[in-house]
Amino acid sequence: MTRRMVRSLLVLSMAAGLVAGGIAGCSKEDQTPQPVVRKAVPKEPPKAAEGGKPADAQASKPAVVLYSSAGKRDPFVPFLKVETKEVRAGNENVPPLQRYDLGELKFVGVIWAPKAAYALVEDAEGKGYTVTVGTKIGRGGGVVLRILDGEIVVKEEFRDNTGTKVVRRSSMKLQSAGGK
């Protein structure tokens, strides 16, 4: 079906619905409108204003209304505020897995293949990545050492404040359905 045919069918079905609704809404019973009761309201005589001027003189001045937005919400600001993590400057050439700290990544699953194991990792934005043994991961220059059933072992090498080389092994535990 072409777009034109679909649009024509849509217009025809809407027209048929309106006609059917109009026929169903018509009844042969005459409904008489309720009578309108009008009551006379007595007019009060105009009172003299404070400066000796009649009230009609004050009523002829246009009223100036000032709008204050204090205490009212801005209609152009969304209800839900979403915090976005900014990627640091100079990270354009860095692979996505090396843009995040290990604590910001979440280990969500393992795929076992005949030759190797693949781990599934999600970043803070919810994007998923697969890693294998030897994949660089994390800002600290970490490398995946082992992939086990419930964890990934990562080795990070860096220099501390004194200039000595420090090797740190950390593990990422598998996130279960309950988030534990």
Image: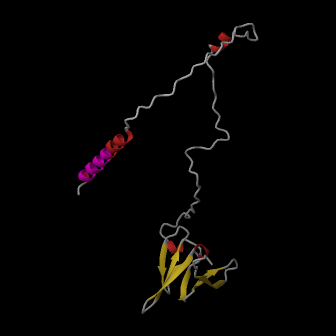
Q: Residue furthest top?
A: 52
Is most of the magenta stretch helix, strand or loop? helix
Q: Is residue 95 visible?
A: no
Q: Quadrant of the N terminus?
A: bottom left
Q: Quadrant of the C terminus?
A: bottom right
On the image, the x and y values in percent for residue 173 come to: 60, 82
Note whether 91 is above or below 176 in the view shown: above
Q: Residue furthest bottom?
A: 114
Q: Residue drawn 59% across and 72% down?
A: 104
Q: Is residue 126 visible?
A: yes
155 in magenta: no
State which region is magenta. 4-16
Would you identify the image quadrant in which residue 24 lies? Answer: top left
On the image, the x and y values in percent for residue 87 come to: 55, 64
Q: Nearer the viewer, residue 24 or 164?
A: 24
Note whether 14 is above or below 140 in the view shown: above
Q: How many marks?
A: 0
Q: Residue drawn 41% across and 31% down?
A: 30
Q: Nearer the viewer, residue 45 or 22?
A: 22
On the image, the x and y values in percent for residue 103 come to: 61, 75
Q: Residue drawn 50% across and 72% down?
A: 96
